Amino acid sequence: MENIDWGSLGFGYYKTDYNVRCYYRNGKWGELEVCSSEEITMHMAATVLHYGQAAFEGMKAFRGVDGRIRMFRPYENAKRMISSAQGVMMAEPPEELFVEACKKAVKLNERFVPPYGSGASLYLRPILIGTGAQVGVHPAKEYLFMVFACPVGPYFKEGFKPVKFQIAKDYDRAAPFGTGKYKVGGNYAASLVSGERAVKEGYSNCIYLNAATHEFIDEAGAANFFGIKNNTYCTPQSSSILPSITNLSLCQIAEDLGMKVERRQIPVEELAEFEEVAACGTAAVVSPINEIVDRETGKKYTWGAEPGPVSTKLYNTLKGIQDGTIEDKHNWNVFVD
C-alpha cells in the first residue's frame, strides 16, 4: 500500500498511476484503454471547449473491514451520467461500460485505496466530453469517456462536524427546465462566484433557492439538502436539483430506521422548524449544518454545535454499509476483486 498519511488527506487532486479511457467514433464506442498520462489532446474546435458538452460523476471506492474493496452504487452513477449525456446531447456510455471502466480504474490504482478506518477513500471521477470539432452550435460526433482516481479525505476540512452556510439570493445555480438536474460542468461554473464569496465571508458554501421566486430551498452548494423534524426526513423536490445518490441512499436508510420521508418544496422559513439540517453528497457524505445566514437580510437560523442524533445515525449507517461493518441488505456495493 502507498506510503501516504491517509489521515491528513484533504479533498483534492492526487496523482495516481493510471486512468481508463474509451472513445466514441463513427457511431459506436471503442474498447477500454489504459493510460498513464494525465493529459488529454483534443481539437481546438472540440464542443466541450465551445458549447459545454461536458458531464462528470463523483463516486467512491472503500477498503472494507474485511480488506475487500467496494464501490458504492456505481450503477446509479452510470444511470445519472446517461441522463446527463441525454440532457446535453452527448453519446451515452452504456451502464456496463461505465461500471467496467470504474472497476478497472480502481484495480489499476489499488495501492492508492486507503486502509479501513483511515477516514479516507478512493474518489473516482468519470468524465464525458465532446471532442469532435464543431463551429456551428451542434453536438459533436466524437466523444471521450474516461475515469481517473485519487485518494481523498473529507470534502469539508471540518469532517463530520457542523458547518455554516450562507443563503445567496443574488445568484442562481440553475433554473427550472434548464440543466440543473444534470451533472454537467456549466452548473458548477455558475456556482463559483457565489461559492468563493461565501468562503471568503466565513462560510462553507451557499444555500441556493429556487430561481423563479427565491422562496424554496434547492441545493446546499454542490450537495443536496435535508432537514429533520418529527421523525421525518425532508428533502427538496425541484426540477433544477441534481439527484444525489447519497440522498437517495439516505432516504432509504431513513425508512429502514422507521422514519417518514418527504420529498417536497421546503420554504426558507421552515428552516426555523427543523431539529437538524445537513448537506449530503458523494464528496461531503453528510455534513451537519449549525448555522444558515441570509446574506441579504442578516436573518440567522442556528442549530447545535455538535452533529444531531439523527444525522449521526444516518451518517454512521451509510458509512457502515460502505465499510462492510453493517449489512448491505439493498446490495448497493459492487466488489472489486
Image (cartoon, rainbow, N blue to C red):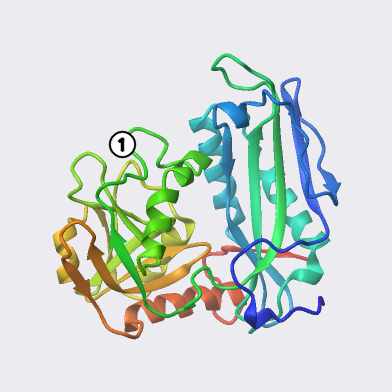
Q: Is residue 165 left or right of residue 301?
A: right
Q: Quick one: SS at disc 1? A: loop
Relative to the observer, which residue lies in front, 49 or 95? 49
Query: Residue 332: horizontal and vertical position, in percent?
Result: 56, 63
User: Which image quadrant: the C terminus?
Assistant: bottom right
Residue 133 visible somewhere in the drawing: yes
Relative to the observer, which residue lies in front, 47 or 100? 47
Task: Specify the quadrant of the image occupied by residue 63.
Answer: bottom right
Query: Residue 13: horizontal and vertical position, in percent?
Result: 67, 61
Residue receiving disc 1:
176
Total marks in image? 1
Vertically, is 305 above or below 71? Answer: below
Instruction: Single out the residue that lies furthest toward the top.
Output: 136
**Callout 1: few (<14), some (14-19), or many (20+) C-alpha neighbours within 10 Å?**
some
Vertically, is 55 above or below 322? Answer: above
Relative to the observer, which residue lies in front, 128 or 199? 199
Q: At label 1, which amino acid type do we have?
A: Pro
Q: Is residue 199 left or right of residue 29?
A: left
The residue shown at (52%, 38%) is: 84
Relative to the observer, which residue lies in front, 225 or 324? 225
Query: Residue 324: horizontal and vertical position, in percent?
Result: 61, 77
Query: Residue 71: horizontal and vertical position, in percent?
Result: 65, 63
